Every structure is written in C-alpha cells, then in structure tokens.
Amino acid sequence: GKKYYNISELSPELSGQTVLLRGRVHNVRGKGKSSFMVLRQPSGTVQVVLFVDDKTVSKGMVKYVSGIPKESIVDVSGEVHVPQEPIQGCSCSQVELKALGVKCVSRAAPLPFDLSDASRKEEDLQREDAQFVTVTQDTRLENRWIDLRTPVNQAIFRIQSAVCQLFREALLAEGFQEIHTPKLIAGASEGGAAVFRLDYMGREGCLAQSPQFYKQMAICSDMSRVFELGPVFRAEKSFTHRHLCEFTGLDLEMTINEHYNEVLDVLDRLFVYMFNGMKSRCAADLAAIQQQFPVEPLKYLPKTLRLPFEEGMRLLQEAGFEPDPLGDLTTELERNLGKIVREKYDTDFYILYRYPLAVRPFYTMPDPEDARYSNSFDVFIRGEEIISGAQRVHDAALLTERAKVHEIPLESIQSYINAFKYGAPPHGGFGVGLERVVMLFCGLDNIRKTSLFPRDPKRLTP
Ligand code: ATP
Ligand code: AMO
C-alpha cells in the first residue's frame, strides 16, 4: 500500500518530495485562485496550500476544496515546501504542503459547536470584551465524540492511559497479579443506598459497587497480592463535580504480616512511582492542559506524609473549625484540612489514617487497642479524596457481628462471610478512583472532564 505520513514526520529534509497524509480539515478558506487549509491529526497541524495552475490544479478544484466542511476527513497529496516565514498557528511551522490532490474521505455534517470555542481559556471567556461563543458542558458531552478531539481532551486520556500502565507496572514489580472479578453480584458490597439493582434471571442481582468482596476472596484463595482495574457502579443520587455513576476502580488487596502499615508502604511507593512517571512520560500532555487550565503542579513528598486522623482533627480545631472527633469529615473540612496540610508540610498528597470505626464500612478491622477507631485510611490530593483503604476483618464471627451492627441482611453476603471460615490470612488493601486521580493530579474542576463517556444521574448517552 501507499505510505501515509504523520505530520510529525514532515521536515525540511523532505522538501520537493510528494507525500500523502490523511487528516481532518481543521479549517479552510478560499481566496480566489488559492485555498489555505489547516490539516489536523491528533498529534498536530500543518498548512496545506492550493494554487490554480495550468497543470494539475483547476479553478473548480480550488472551489471544491474551499467548500469542504470543517472536521471532514481528507487525503491530501502534496509537495513538501519550505515557506519563507515559519507558519504561525500550526504545530508544523517549518514546512507546508503544496497540494496536488485533495480527496474527501468522510464529509462532516454541520458542527454543533466549534472546537476552538471548546478550547478557550477560562480567563479569556471571563474578559469583558469577550465575543466568544461559550459552549456549555452539556453540549460538549452530548457530542462527546467531537469534544474528545480537542488537544486538552486528547492529553487527558493519554494521561489516563499512562496512569493505568504505571499502576500495573509498579504492582507487577511488587509481586502482585492482575485479576478480574464479577460485576454482576448478589448483594451490595458498599451499602444498600447507592447500589444498582437488576433482574438476574428472575432473581435480584446488583452491579458491583466495588471489587471488595472478590478481591478479599482471592486472598482467601491464596493469591497473596492481587490488583484489578475495572468498572465500578454507584447509583449516586447527587450531582457533584466528583461523583460518577460508573467509574474505573484501581483496586488492590494483599496479605499482611504484622501491621497494615505494610499496605501503606506499597501505596506510598506506588503513588510516588506513578506521579514521577506521569511527570516524565506525559510532560507534553500536562503542558497542553496547563495552556487551557493553568494550575500549580502537584506537590508531593519522596515519602508520603501519614497523618493520624486525631492529629488532623486537632489541626482543624486549631484553625477554628469544629469537626466531630468521632464522625466523618465533610467535603468542606477535607478541603480545609488539605490547605492546612499543604501549608504545614508542603504537600498536596497525604494519607489520613486511623479513622473512627463508626464511619467505615462493616468489613473494616477495628483498632485492636481502641475500638472507637479502625485500621483504615483515606488518601487526599489537593484536599479531595482519591483513595479509601483498610485492614479487613478476616474472622467470620467478627465479620458477622460487624455486618449486624451495620444492619446488613446476612443472607445477601453469606458466601462472602463463608470465605473466611476455612482459614484466612490477615490482609488489607485499598481502592483508587481513576477519574479522580487524573482530575486532581491535573487540577481540573470536574470529573466529567476525565471520564471518556461520563455516566452521572442525568446522563446515559452517548
Ligand atoms: P480560531 O478559530 O481561534 O481563529 P485557528 O484555527 O486560527 O483558530 P488554531 O490555533 O489552529 O487556531 O486552533 C484553534 C483551536 O483548535 C485551538 O483553540 C486549539 O485548541 C484547537 N486545536 C488546535 N490543534 C488541534 C489539534 N491537533 N486537535 C484538536 N484541536 C486542535
Ligand atoms: P470507596 O467507596 O471510598 O471505597 O471508593 C474508593 C475510591 O473510588 C472513588 N470513588 C468515586 N469516583 C467517582 N465517582 C464516584 N461515585 C465514586 N465513589 C468512589 C474515590 C474513592 O476514594 N472498597 C473500598 C475500597 C477499599 O477499601 O479497598 C471502596 O470502594 O476515589
């Protein structure tokens, strides 16, 4: 077959050669006997010029090319040409193409919004003299397959891919194995309120709210270190900037010998590896996001700060807040604690551990020294939660007791409880929200920006 070039391959060395490229019409305008097109590929843009001559390019052809709608896909064959001045506004500024032929491969219908309007900086939109069209998030999501073509969205999902790869790399190197647990399950794993119920061949089933039960059962089956990347379903009623009804969970579970600090050690190494990897592998993508959404890069320490919950409450009190010392933190208090920690310890990323038992799920191990507390933790980026984790109850009798306290119908979780009756090693683990990690690492303001096709209480399409 013929060679199709990437814009990134074009250079002055190819001057005079004829090359073939497939791309989108980013924009095109005709001016009498000439036509100027910006051809776009995911990696960049190049200028294509078309002049009427007596050989290959007719007047009709220039007219035809000038009329190809934006976002159409075209094949351009053209001669590489070094312009007198670098081309402004194209990523490929050193060369342009003198078109010999343009073929429309797929014609785009009129667009619901303009990609450049979706790429405006917040600060430009706020300007008093701004004459831009504001594209609402709804319009963008309604047409997500167009929206995803913007440079920022391209960058976001390359970063998301890198996060998954880094997560796998780091855990495989630590001796973990990847597993896949069922998403159709019999009972709610994280409490009944936010579960999607469904008809499972005539009886009631649920969509998994986490791989919690099954990653623990894998531990009971002697897979001593496991992880999973998979979908998580939550029937969230509230419409917030950080909740989705379906998100991607990065979960792990591992046996421990003496203390759940062993889990925190893995977490610490894992995230420092991931953050370093994102910074080095995704530098260009992070810079592209910075262009539209400027934010201070994430600050994290070589060894992650571990703050006891009680100490966190003390810091909040000192700053004039009134947290419930044995209750849960509100979103507002979490944010404020994030600010306090940032000032005191110079980090945007930290672990808060030893939460009150009452606010944690039934499977959480109580603190053996003080049953008001638990062997559990949350992890925050920029004052928002990205991870929950804990040591788990591995004794069937205690697990039954804890489920009763939480008023969980035992028949719905019987097989889970049974898993601990035949010898179960002490273990712990945690769950990470992928979309939240990307959102908060990049300092974005809405989780819909980091979900490919977000599912929220109002959105089930596209
Ligand atoms: P305008 O309509 O604002 O005058 P322009 O076409 O002259 O735009 P460009 O900088 O080429 O200016 O791009 C306009 C918009 O299209 C930019 O805001 C940019 O976000 C977006 N854009 C540029 N390159 C790409 C690309 N490779 N993929 C997707 N969108 C892009
Ligand atoms: P938790 O319910 O805290 O813990 O969830 C773990 C992480 O998943 C993310 N997350 C969400 N992301 C987007 N939309 C949502 N609706 C949503 N809900 C949660 C958050 C959160 O920190 N089984 C435990 C984990 C464990 O202990 O291993 C669990 O599911 O980033």
Image (cartoon, helix red, strand yellow):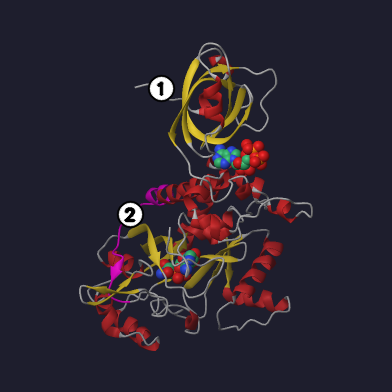
Kindly identify which residue carries mark 1.
3
Question: Is 236 or 33 nearer to us in this picture?
Answer: 33
Q: Which residues are the magenta region?
A: 169-187
| Residue 458's disc number | none
Residue 394: image location, x then y, percent: 33, 75
Q: Is mark 1 within 8 Å of ligand 1?
A: no
Q: Residue at x 60, y 73 (%)?
A: 331
Kindly identify which residue carries mark 2.
178
Helix, strand or loop at mark 1: loop
Q: CA distance from mark 1 to mark 2?
A: 39 Å
Q: Residue at x 38, y 68 (%)?
A: 210
Counting residues from the start of the chain, the first of labels 1 and 2 encountered is 1
Q: Residue at x 52, y 23 (%)?
A: 61
- Can residue 42 be seen from the camera position used here? yes
Q: Quadrant of the C terminus?
A: bottom left
In the rendered structure, does residue 345 fall within the stretch colored magenta? no
Q: Residue at x 62, y 21 (%)?
A: 33
Question: Is 373 or 108 nearer to us in this picture?
Answer: 108
Is residue 342 toward the left or the right of residue 146 in the image? Answer: right
